[in-house]
Image: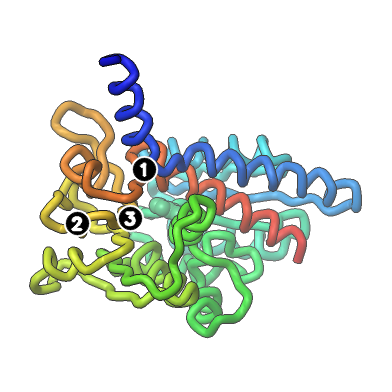
Amino acid sequence: MENSTSINIKAASEGNIIDGKRIAQEIKDELKEQTAKLKEQGMKGCLAVIQVGADPASSVYVRNKKRACAYIGIESRAYELEEATTQEQLLELIGQLNNDPQVTGILVQLPVPKHIDEQQIIQAISPAKDVDGFHPQNVGALVSGLPGFVSCTPAGVIQLLKRSGIAIEGKNCVVIGRSNIVGKPMAVLMLRENATVTVAHSKTEHLEEICRRADILIVAVGKPKMINASYIKEGAVVIDVGIHRDAENKLCGDVDYDSVVSHVKAITPVPGGVGPMTIAMLMNNCVEALMR
Ligand code: GUN
């Protein structure tokens, strides 16, 4: 009797965890099928990944991106440039790749070293090959509701919500964070899905109170375990975009998972939530790029 009760409770508590790893795999499998069909029609893609310097976290991301390309069946080329690479050298390489018909997608892993002007680099990439969706032309297209590449992490959050059967339309959504890569495009995408959107940030007053109004709380604040139960409305959906290492060197997010999990309708874990979706959506953009 005791046993069956504990099994039921476990099942219920696992029911509210959004499995980003599984959903990302599902998307990559769909893309793999699509690239195989495109190959039969003579269309194949190649992603050029540029890394400047040897930041260990960036090296892990770059390796995972190359692996995902191999999995879904598109070629990848890695350009591992030394830390001392100049702005001019990097611009020269981007120019060559823009003009190379074999190359269908280009990304420069961020952050770049301090002596490099990140915005100028982003703007040098041809918008038609900008699979990160960072070029102002793609950002403008998103805001205007026109076709273009959408930043991968916020696009991944939308897929997580939709594929988990979570309704967005008409809901109060609070996004914490206003970065170009996550917060701003996230807010625009939620608006496009007809949510009522509030963007909060480090200067926001009464943050807890604002967050407690959210049906869907998307956290990209960049502070380990900052969001505890006092920020959460009972039954809210919580999406945690953060990734950090805690005092015990374990991966954790911006949300204090253990403190909030019993209050939420659904939550993304770290790791295994938003992270895998970023790469799945990058692959989605790579397939879109090769079809253009
Ligand atoms: N650094 C952190 N996230 C990203 C991303 O999505 N794309 C690139 N190019 N660099 C990043």
Considering every residue shown, the one lying at the far right of the view is 41
Snapshot quadrant of residue 218: bottom left
Check contact, mark 2 vs mark 3: CB within 8 A: no
178 to the left or right of 182: left
Return the disc, 1 or 3, that comes first in the chain's sequence.
Answer: 1
Mark 2 closeness class: few <14, some 14–19, many ≥20 residues within 10 Å: many
Q: CA distance from mark 2 to mark 3?
A: 9 Å
- Residue at 60% x, 57% y is 106
Q: Amino acid at mark 3?
A: Val
Q: Nearer the viewer, residue 132 or 160?
A: 160
- Label 3 CB-ligand 1 distance < 8 A: no
Q: Amino acid at mark 2?
A: Ile
Q: CA distance from mark 2 to mark 1?
A: 15 Å
- Residue on which the image places disc 1: 16
Residue 282 in picture, x, y percent from top left: 56, 53
Tell me, for residue 237, which label it has, or none.
Answer: 3
Tell me, for residue 232, which label it has, or none.
Answer: 2
Return the disc, 2 or 1, that comes first in the chain's sequence.
Answer: 1
Q: CA distance from mark 1 to mark 3?
A: 9 Å
Residue 37 in picture, x, y percent from top left: 84, 48
Q: How many marks?
A: 3
Residue 255 in picture, x, y percent from top left: 22, 48
- Residue at 27% x, 54% y is 235
Helix, strand, or loop for circle 2?
A: loop
Helix, strand, or loop for circle 3?
A: strand
37 to the left or right of 179: right
Q: Amino acid at mark 1?
A: Asn
